[in-house]
Image (tube, rainbow, N blue to C red):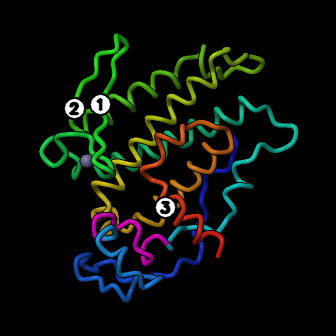
Amino acid sequence: MGGCHSYGKGDVETHDQNLEFSNIPVQKLKNNNTKAAPSLEEKPYLLSVYVSERITDMDMKTLSSLPDGFDKAEWMATHTIAFFKHINLFSSALSEFCTTKTCPTTAAPGNTTYYWQFDHNKKEKCSAPLYIDYAMSYIQELLTDENVFPTSTGSRFPNGFPFLVQKIFLYLFRTLTHLYWAHFREIVKMEMHPHLNTLYIHFMTFSKEFDLLEPMETAIMDDLTEALHRYNNV
Ligand SMILES: [Zn+2]
């Protein structure tokens, strides 16, 4: 394993986690930009009070880059497994809030709705918990397939390995997107947002480093990605 997924608990400034989102005055926003207020109400994860929180100040680019002498496929495989485990853990922790009643469709920012696509190209509009279940089961199956993610020493990764990793990253990205969009209030109540922000920015930095996600796909979360980068560089 790459050994780079144990985020140490850093010195994180604490804030009152019980803030009512609707009561957050515009003055609390870093730029005092009144025009941004409606969007922040719709996207509480962009509020500076939350976006500034993470559990480590480690540089994600350094953490993601392939170290000299490491095998690229091995590096990608260990990260894919670790990202899957972390994101699966988050979605499990939030499963009581993400139900067929609360999330009858798999909603994401910008009026986006994700459809599950079966092999025979039939798209199915499904609830978010079902979509996430499909996604996690699909990934789990690939990760435990010895022909795709070989575990024995000397085994080779298949030719289509990068394509499969891209597909896994797509489903992980969509899961993260739904959690931020539909469940950020619960995430804050559970004080999980510093962990999720750290995981998200590591995931996005890694996917950019290895071209694992299409910019068109990730555009709906560019505002969060940019905000998290901005705070990381302070
Ligand atoms: Zn949901």
Magenta-tinted stretch: 41-51
Q: Secondary structure at mark 3?
A: helix
Q: Quick one: which residue is furthest to the top in this view? A: 120
Q: Nearer the viewer, residue 211 or 65?
A: 211
Numbered mark located on residue 174 in the image: none
Kind of residue at disc 1: Tyr
Q: Nearer the viewer, residue 194 or 85?
A: 194
State the quadrant of the C terminus.
bottom right
Kind of residue at disc 3: Asn
Image quadrant assignment for residue 163: top right
Numbered mark located on residue 197 in the image: 3
Q: Quick one: which residue is furthest to the left in this view? A: 101
Magenta-colored segment: predominant secondary structure = helix
Q: Is residue 50 magenta?
A: yes
Q: Where does residue 175 sit, x and y in percent of width and height?
A: 38, 43
Horizontal side, residue 15 vs residue 143: left or right: left
The residue under label 2 is 126
Report whether the residue tagged 1 is closer than 8 Å to ligand 1. Answer: no
Observer-side mark, 2 or 3, equals: 2
Mark 2 touches mark 3? (CB < 8 Å): no
Q: Is residue 153 above or below residue 62?
A: above
The residue under label 1 is 115
Q: Where does residue 199 sit, x and y in percent of width and height?
A: 52, 54
Between the residue at mark 3 and the residue at mark 1, the CA separation in whole angstroms equals 25 Å
| Sequence-earlier tag: 1 or 2 | 1
Kind of residue at disc 2: Cys
Q: Which residue is rendered at x = 32% and y = 50% of the image?
A: 110
Q: Answer few, some or many: residues within 10 Å of disc 1's Cα (few below 14, many 20 plus, some between 14 and 19).
A: some
Q: Answer few, some or many: residues within 10 Å of disc 2's Cα (few below 14, many 20 plus, some between 14 and 19).
A: some
Q: Quick one: which residue is furthest to the right in this view? A: 69
| Sequence-earlier tag: 2 or 3 | 2
